[in-house]
Amino acid sequence: MQANLIWDTQHECMPREELEQLQLERLQATLNRAYKNVTCYRTKFNELGIVPEDVTSLADLAKLPFTTKEDLRLNYPYGMFAVPLREVVRIHSSSGTTGKPTVVGYTKNDLKIWSNLVARMMTAAGVTHDDVVQIAFGYGMFTGAFGLHYGSEVIGAAVIPMSGGNSDKQIMIMQDYRSSALVCTPSYAITLAERMEQQGVDPKSLALKVGLFGGEPWSEAMRREIESRLLISATDNYGLSEVIGPGVAGECRCKNGMHIAEDAFIAEIIDPETCQVLPPGSVGELVLTTVCKEAVPMIRYRTRDITSLDYTTCECGRTMARMKKTMGRSDDMLIIKGVNVFPSQIEEVLVAIEGCQPHYQLIVDRKGALDVLEVCIEVRENTFFDEMKKQRAFLDMVGKRIDSVLGVGVTVKLVEPNSIPRHEGKADRVIDRRQTR
């Protein structure tokens, strides 16, 4: 393993006592701006009888109200902005697949901070100014492509703004332009690997050396598959548009958790049911507070992502807390016959089975008083066997493996490649029909 490069040693290796003092100072400034300029926050604080001056330590953060995606929707489009619109130089939003989109803005300084946070993450993964970065995220209102684009340019790497889709052209560009870093969702990386195999493209003939994958939860089994099929180092990164976009956290080459940019974000882990803050090392829902954003500060934003935090110093020398791979979302967790089920558990099973793709959908329904779970799996074309007996044996095998992991019986259904709906490159993982019955 090459030595780990560090983009911003001053902050990434800061002693925790100094870091916490910096967090508190930035938090107090953020709270004052939010209270003064954002009606939603002023109302929330007043209802609880809290003023920003009441926060004199990081422990006081737990007294403050949470912010949710619903708050952003109710204040659509600009109600959460803490600066006049004339100071906003960029506007992004979510896809709005479940109603009004959530809208976020950036000042010039926000964009500068964002670019540098992404540069940290990319440097930690192994990207340098010598690299050619192929970005296969969709450009548009989605923050993913732009964040990685500008972070790459800050590093000094060459950027290919390929955008998403068109796998044959993606592969041609990799070959002809000698792309050395690939940016996309992990599931799309698998799609590219499969297409290369169909074309007879040997990954050894490519210049690819590192992949930066985010936008959806993925398992260690999926990492191993990507690395073995593309012959690259596959690294995880984390971000969300409501907080800033990509750049919140990312793995170094030790691959032992994603380093959170704690000088820009204060991270908490809460019990998603009781909303109580959990002790270090506990598994729960990640809550983030921005302490550098000017345009749209987020105070105790409930990400709904399930993870845990490790505050020990990493082998690479970075002192910032590391978050484990997200194991799912608190709003995606399914309770089937009294058992907690996360989509990531099923993914672990599917990735290990020859013929299955990491594109799947869970459909939960209720028959009478009983919950039933159907797992729809995209399979490679040659998996649709001519003989029904072989297909039935395959379905039984997949069902038994999932049952052994979950402890819940499931029905497995094979579906055609690319038949599961996607948005922004991500598959829609869960459909819970119980809620409509």
Image (cartoon, rainbow, N blue to C red):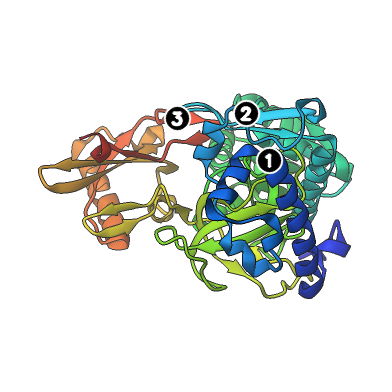
What residue is at 45 percent from the left and 63 percent from the top?
271
In the figure, residue 137 lies in which quadrant? top right
Q: Position of residue 151 (x, y in %)?
A: 80, 42
- Image location of residue 70, percent across then percent down: 49, 38
Horizontal side of residue 374 vs 108, given as left or right: left
Residue at the spot 39% in from the left edge and 54% down from the top edge? 342
Q: What is the distance, in whole Å, between disc 2 and disc 3 at their CAs?
A: 22 Å
Among numbered discs 2 and 3, the one appearing first in the sequence: 3
What residue did someone put label 1 on?
183
Q: For the residues marked 2 and 1, what is the alpha-carbon distance in whole angstroms?
A: 10 Å
Write the residue at 73% across / 38% down.
147
Q: Residue furthest left?
A: 368
Q: Amino acid at mark 3?
A: Thr
For residue 119, above or below residue 281: above
371 left or right of 428 in image: left
CA separation in Å, label 1 and label 3:
26 Å
Earlier-in-chain disc, 1 versus 3: 3
Q: Secondary structure under badge 3?
A: loop
Res. 224 in view: no
Q: Is residue 334 left or right of residue 36?
A: left
Q: Amino acid at mark 1?
A: Val
Q: Quarter of the image containing the C terminus?
A: top left
Label disc, if present, on residue 98 of the rendered structure = 3
Which quarter of the image is occupied by the N terminus?
A: bottom right
Q: Mark 1, mark 3: which one is toward the viewer? A: 3
Vertical relation: 202 (above or below) 401: above
Where residue 66 sits in the image (x, y, percent)?
54, 51
150 or 350: nearer the viewer: 150
Closer to the camera in the image, 410 or 39: 39
- Secondary structure, mark 2, is loop
User: Which quadrant would residue 416 be assigned to in this image?
Assistant: top left
